[in-house]
Each structure stands twice: as C-alpha cells, then as structure tokens.
Image: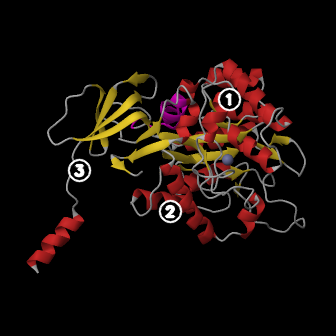
C-alpha cells in the first residue's frame, strides 16, 4: 500500500525538468539573426540567450547543428474548424458536417499547426461551428490535446443577409457561417460573443451580397465604430474582413486593429492604414490555394485574382503598412501554414521582415508581451528549422524542433 502510494506520487508529479541549453547554428530573436548564439530554457521560460552562455549544473544540451532557432511562429489568420475546400466546399462544411465531426477534425488541425512550429494561432471564426473554438482552446490549455495557444473569435459577425451559404428558397432560414447582427443590436452581439469566450472580435466589413457580384460594404461606418469601441472597452482587439477600398476605409476609421485580405486596396487606403497603425493580413495563400483548386498549375502568368492580390500587397508594402502573417489556413491544409511566408517573400517582402512579422510582429499586433521574441523571461515557445530561412524562406517548412512552454512537442 505504501509502495503503491509512492508510485502514484511519482506518476502524479514528474521530476522537475533540468534546464536545457539549445545550441543551434544561429538564433533569430524576432528581429536579428545571431550566428553562434545559444538559448537557455528553464521551466516554461527562456532564461538567457547569447553566445557561450554560463549554465547551471545539471543543464542538458540540445544540439541542432546547421539549424536556426526562432521564436515559435504565430499564425495570424486561422480557421481550425475548416478543412481544404478541394476536399469539401465551404457551403457543405457549414451545412452538412456535424459539429462533433468538425470538432474532431479541428483537434487534428490544431496538432498539425503546432507540429509546423506555430505555437500560437489567432482563429478568426468557426464558420458555422458556433462556440466550439472556446472548448478546443480549453482542451489545449488543459493539456488534453496538443495544439497552439489560441486566440479565438468564436462565431464572427456579419451584417444580416450579407454572408452565406446562399442560394436557397427565399425566406427559408439557412444556417450561416457567422452570426448576423446590425444597428443597435451589434454592440450586444459583440458583448455576448466576448461573454461566451471570444478573445478577438471579427467583423465582415464587406462581402459579396449575391453570387457573382463584387464585394460591397456591409456595415455602416457607425456600426463598425460602435462594435469596435465595445470590443476595445472589453480589452479585445478587432479584425475586419475587408477587400474593397470603402470597406477597408470604414474599418480603419472605426479603429479596427487588423484588416484581413485587403485584396483591392489602393495606395490611398494603404496610406490611411499606415497613418492609423492598422495592420494588414494579406492572406496571399488563400487566393493562391483557390486559384489552384480552379485549375491553375502555378505557372506564370498567374490568374488575374492572384495577380491582383500581389499588386495590392505591393502597394501596402510601398506605403509602409505593418504586415501580419496569416494564410487563412483551412482554405488549404493545416500544417502548411508556412505557405504564406513563402508567398509573401515571392511577392516582394524581405525574408527577414517576414520572419519578424510571423513572430515579434504578430505578437505585437495581437497584444502579446510574453512571446514572439527570444529574450530572457519570455515563454519558451520555440521552433527550429533546418538551414537558414533568411537565405531561403522555404526552410520555414523544414521544422526539426518545436518547443511550447519549455516542453519539446516535436
Ligand atoms: Zn478567414
């Protein structure tokens, strides 16, 4: 009996892990590349970073010859409850997949995301899966399933009649991919979503009202301003889906924190974003994926939609807009999150700027002060890749180590 209780004790309380000294070829600290640096981790924190660190007795070495150690990547635009549209069209996922099925898939998506080196993800809407992201986040935080630290938007908010699925007998109530709200009700919708667990509020500031139509603004400037103020009062940041210049302009002036897509932005609207400090999440990977589902083989010239995304992104870069790295993952496979980084570089952004955006930049954009850089006192959320991602951004897909909170998860 006594032996059994000792055994149970040992099982319940794992021995305190020894400090770990990680020795890669180089360290990217969130801003700068440092050849020859090492990083010391103790518990869930980074203790020190620099060349030839003194280490406490009992430290174990973790050697990564030829590897680059970076802060864990932060996915800026995720949909863990969606899976690639070439597997199942979005309408069918929203209308025909059971919540339990979608949740089971999301647990697999979360694991794939973490194993790709993304130790934090901002999930921008369950797309018809209700508040299931709140439970998914709890399951990860409680150590029940592996996954990134999540910021969740829950249902996201659309103007009545603006979103989808569409195309049914008029007047029939069809389940929608986000929560409809307008006017005086909008503030209550924001507050209810926050009360139910939303860490971030997402508005659709423009959308295609009918099939085959171009996107047009949905919410009025006053609606966006009131909803954004309610979120900010509660300490939640706001993301706005917007691709049209007018939708973007209204969202920027309303004070949203990030604009998602921005694919038809103009020099004028990007100047406004720059001046207001609004961050752009270009989601180039989503447009790339959809073009490929429609038959594009990747050869140039790219389809007009892909060229338009690149043109708009180039205008944003020229205006000095802060860039978020977020691929709209779910449109394409979870775990292929680094695809956005490759496309940003291909579209003209410097690799080191992309790496900064995916780590320290996204952390700042989302309000995190405990991650996104390699510095003493921050969370030991780390990723190591084979080779040098500054020389070749494709190395971000060659993940050799993932550590979350000091625990090696891959
Ligand atoms: Zn999205």
Within-10-Å neighbours for mark 2: few <14, some 14–19, many 20+: few
160 is higher (above) or lower (below) than 135: above
Residue placed at 45% from the left, 29% from the top? 30
Membership of 360 in magenta stretch: yes
CA separation in Å, label 1 and label 3: 42 Å
The location of residue 360, given as percent across then percent down, is 48, 31
Kindly indicate whether the residue at mark 3 contacts the one at mark 1 (C-beta within 8 angstroms): no
Of residues 355 and 151, the one drawn nearer to the viewer in this rendering? 355
Mark 3 — residue? 17
Secondary element type, mark 3:
loop
Residue 121 position, x and y percent, is: 53, 46
The answer to if 310 sits in the magenta stretch is no
Label whose residue precedes the other's in the sequence (2 or 3): 3
Give the residue at mark 1. 346
Residue 114 in view (yes/no): yes
Tell me the distance, in whole angstroms, between the alpha carbons under discs 2 and 3: 29 Å
Q: Which residues are magenta?
A: 355-370
Q: How is the image coloured?
A: secondary structure
Q: Position of residue 379 (x, y in %)?
A: 36, 40
Name the residue located 23 percent from the left edge and 66 percent from the top edge: 12
Q: Badge 3 local density, few (<14 within 10 Å), some, or many (20+)?
A: some
Between disc 2 and disc 3, the foreground one is: 3
Left or right: residue 185 compared with residue 14: right
Query: On the image, numbered disc 2 is attached to which residue?
Result: 135
Q: Crowding near pointer 1: few (<14 within 10 Å), some, many (20+)?
A: few
The residue nearer to you, when weighing 228 against 286, is: 286
Closer to the eye: label 2 or 1: 1
Q: Nearest the camera: 144 or 248?
A: 144
């Amino acid at each position: 009996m006594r032996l059994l209780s000792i055994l149970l004790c040992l099982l319940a309380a794992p021995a305190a892990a020894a400090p770990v000294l990680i020795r890669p070829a180089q360290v990217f600290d969130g801003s700068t590349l440092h050849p020859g640096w090492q990083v010391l981790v103790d518990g869930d924190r980074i203790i020190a970073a620099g060349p030839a660190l003194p280490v406490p007795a009992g430290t174990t070495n973790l050697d990564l010859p030829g590897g680059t150690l970076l802060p864990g990547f932060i996915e800026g635009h995720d949909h863990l409850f969606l899976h690639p549209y070439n597997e199942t069209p979005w309408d069918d996922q929203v209308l025909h997949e059971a919540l339990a099925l979608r949740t089971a898939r999301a647990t697999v998506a979360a694991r794939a995301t973490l194993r790709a080196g993304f130790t934090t993800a901002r999930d921008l809407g369950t797309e018809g899966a209700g508040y299931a992201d709140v439970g998914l986040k709890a399951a990860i935080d409680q150590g029940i399933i592996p996954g990134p630290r999540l910021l969740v938007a829950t249902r996201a908010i659309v103007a009545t009649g603006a979103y989808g699925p569409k195309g049914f007998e008029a007047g029939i109530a069809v389940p929608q991919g986000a929560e409809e709200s307008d006017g005086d009700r909008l503030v209550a919708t924001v507050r209810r979503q926050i009360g139910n667990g939303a860490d971030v509020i997402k508005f659709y500031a423009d959308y295609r009202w009918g099939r085959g139509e171009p996107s047009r603004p949905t919410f009025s400037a006053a609606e966006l301003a009131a909803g954004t103020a309610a979120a900010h009062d509660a300490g939640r940041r706001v993301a706005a889906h917007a691709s049209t210049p007018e939708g973007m302009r209204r969202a920027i002036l309303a004070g949203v924190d990030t604009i998602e897509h921005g694919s038809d932005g103009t020099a004028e609207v990007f100047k406004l974003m720059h001046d207001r400090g609004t961050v752009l999440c270009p989601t180039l990977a989503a447009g790339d994926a959809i073009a490929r589902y429609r038959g594009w083989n990747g050869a140039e010239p790219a389809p007009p939609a892909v060229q338009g995304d690149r043109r708009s992104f180039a205008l944003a870069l020229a205006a000095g807009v802060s860039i978020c790295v977020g691929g709209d993952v779910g449109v394409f496979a979870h775990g292929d999150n680094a695809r956005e980084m490759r496309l940003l570089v291909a579209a003209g952004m410097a690799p080191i700027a992309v790496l900064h955006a995916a780590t320290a930049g996204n952390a700042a954009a989302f309000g995190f002060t405990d991650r996104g850089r390699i510095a003493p006192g921050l969370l030991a959320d780390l990723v190591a890749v084979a080779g040098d991602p500054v020389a070749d951004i494709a190395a971000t897909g060659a993940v050799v180590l993932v550590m979350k909170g000091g625990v090696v998860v891959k």
